[in-house]
Amino acid sequence: MSARRGCFTLRSTHGKTVRVCATIANGRIEHLTITGDFFGEPVEAFRKLADELIGLGADDAEEIRKKVSGFLRENVKWIEGISEEDLGKAILECVRRLSEN
Amino acid sequence: MSGEWRLLEVEWPEDPYLNLAAEEAIARAVGEGVAPTTLRFWRNANAVVIGAFQCASLEVRSRECLRHGVKVVRRFTGGGAVYHDIRNLNFAVSFRKPSPIPGDSIMKAYEAVGRAVVSGFGKLGVEAEFVPINDIQVRGRKICGMAGTLSRSLLFVHGCILVGSNLEILSRVLNVPKEKLEAKGVGKVRARVTTLIDELGREVGMDEVKDALKRGFEEVFDVEIVPGELTEWERKMINELYEKKYSTIEWNLGPCVKCPDRERDLKIFEKFGLISVKGEL
């Protein structure tokens, strides 16, 4: 099965945008990037979160959701302009769309 | 009067990487308590400055940047990509915590700094308003965007004012997501921005704008702002940040360093000479 790559952009009701780009290969997340015009600290945390998701099953929404909320709780000091839910939603939606036939 | 702030007018318009290194170094100095609360004014000659959570390849139109000689640099605060030219004016305010901002809140900091900028615009004869989260608008059009950060000992806000910027180049080099434009109710970047000169209907000098802003800050924060110099500590930190961070392609590309498109991005930026290629790739 060939790899599929794409991005999903979510405009948050908190005023900012999060854009998630991912590559799905053999039903798993091969690569993922979280970008956007939101605010938060530390800057490196969002890249580390993306790395943490690599290898997870693209259809395992529960596991992805759990990983995202656990990581944010432990590693992100603050986030403004988007909510934690927005971030999780953007990741799941990006992965879901790429998993569809 | 509740104190004195330092005013810094240090800039390297042709070297946006150095300008951003200075921006972070000054903020760090204030946060560390080795420099007083500081207001800085500075300019870039021709650059796109992307947010800390953005990727150069997603936010800028590389070919347009090449055509117009626009360099791309990533800052240490979040927020969106902005175009800077010599007719933009940037300001930065660094507070050591506890700051005069209630609760040291970043959102309240945008509001308070926004009030100071709006007050400064008022002195020039432009009626503006702060629009949450981080914009200042005139008649519904953006004239200034702000960004900021918060750490253990620092509260920092900076912003970019469109004084007489080339809005045509701005709209060509920025690749704004359609979701953002739709949320703002406009189809094109050009339609949602304005400049001080457009609003005033006359030329306005940078010194006049800086003076008005300084008075706006003095009024809103009830302080006296006096000209100062970079400290030796700050000069060293600027050089260190420039060498290790702001002149590296790894930093300036953004979090997309592991993206499948990274090789393509590297080639584009190397070819166009937009980003210094130094450090670990």
Image: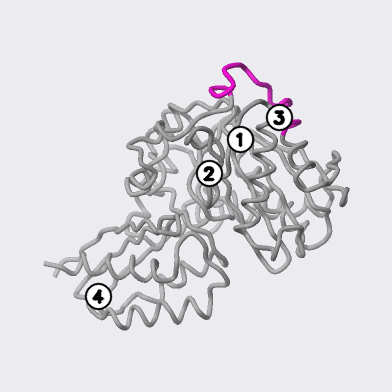
The quarter holding residue A22 reads bottom left
Task: Give the CA distance from mark 3 to mark 2.
Answer: 28 Å
Asked if badge 4 and badge 3 are on a common chain, one would say no
* Chain at tag 3: B
Is-magenta flag for residue B207? yes
Name the element at disc 2.
strand
Task: Give the CA distance from mark 4 to mark 3.
Answer: 56 Å
Residue marked by disc 2 = B49
Question: Residues at badges 1 and 4 in contact (C-beta under 8 Å)?
Answer: no
Question: Residues at badges 2 and 1 in contact (C-beta under 8 Å)?
Answer: yes
Image point (65%, 51%), residue name: B157
The quarter holding residue B271 reads top left
Residue marked by disc 1 = B44
Q: Earlier in the sequence, mark 3 or mark 2?
A: 2
Q: Is B186 left, or right, of B135 in this rendering?
A: left
Task: Give the CA distance from mark 3 to mark 1.
Answer: 25 Å
Q: Nearer the viewer, mark 3 or mark 2?
A: 3
Establish if B5 lies above or below B41.
Answer: below
Is-magenta flag for residue B118? no
Residue marked by disc 4 = A58
